[in-house]
Amino acid sequence: MVIAWAEDFTGAVIDYGSWPDQHRHEYSLADANPSIQTLFPKAGFEGALYAALSALTDECLGREWEREDGAVLKIERALVDANWGQSTDVVYQFCRQSSHAGVILPSHGRYVGASSKPMTEYRKQQGDRLGFNWMIPNVAGKRAIRHVIYDTNYWKSFIHARLAVPVGDKGSLTLYGRIPGAHQLFAEHLTAEYRVKTQGRGRTVDEWKLKPQSHDNHFLDCVAGCAVCGSMLGASLPETFPAKLDRKPMIRLSDKRPGVIPQNGRLKLSELRRQKNG
């Protein structure tokens, strides 16, 4: 997932997908073909994953992205999910040894519920870097590499709030292209979880849970991680931004990919499902 953020958290999804490329709009993790293992049949799990991460990051981080005004930009911050226990050590090794080590960091989404201490109240220890619902802790030992920990509940709510902002307003999130069906899979991933408002410790938070009929929510995780990257680079919502957004999330489609000025068309996520089901 690649998202361009403005300083006021106005965002544009400019690219997303799976590696290896599945060459189709609709697919799932379970029926992925080709898979990483089929591309590297002689490698073990760790070797294949390392090779795949190398190929993907070279492809994305080595690329230049042209903005609408002609300015050429490169990705300034990238996170690699290191939460899956079987892959954690490989991800850490890759991020440490990569030629893009100055840009890439391993990341861990943390479930912070209503009864948990919010990350905004964490006390900074020596060597820590505290951000808004994310932190980079001081490290030592086997995995002595800086990594990011962030509040998944907060950032998933944040993304759905961005999708609810009208096009043209600060803090909105748009998608590229003009064909709604092209983003059907993206919409399914973003609606694979539902929020439960929960109270605890004198506060009310959204706790996100996977729907029983859903299987893949990977693009939701990716877009939340991209928002954390934006925050790490200094993006923040304007002080005048409305505090409460209760409208249903929507996808906006625009004419171009990078640096796009969003158009006025809006498409509800539920409408994509209705189109698919006839």
Image (cartoon, helix red, strand yellow):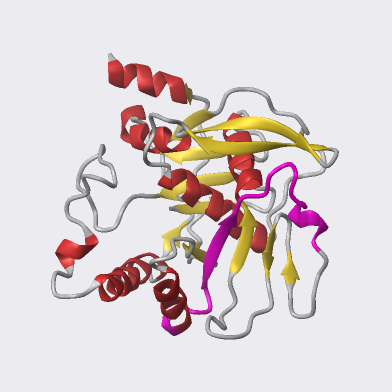
Write the residue at 54% across / 54% down. Answer: 225
In this view, 166 is above or below 13: above
Question: Residue shown at 43%/80% (left/top)?
Answer: 93
Q: Is residue 23 left or right of residue 16?
A: left
Frontmost residue, 275 versus 277: 277
Find residue 257 and report its horizontal and vertical position in percent: 42, 46
Residue 118 sits inside the magenta stretch: yes
Q: Name the residue furthest top.
A: 278
Q: Nearer the viewer, residue 8 or 189?
A: 189
Residue 184 in the image: state x and y as whole percent. Answer: 35, 32
Is any part of residue 12 visible from this angle?
A: yes
Residue located at (28% from left, 74% from top): 51
Residue 43, image quadrant: bottom left
Q: Is residue 19 left or right of residue 210?
A: left
Q: Is residue 277 left or right of residue 262?
A: left
Between 40 and 101, the one nearer to me in the picture: 40
Q: Which residues are magenta?
A: 97-122
Does residue 162 appear in this view? no
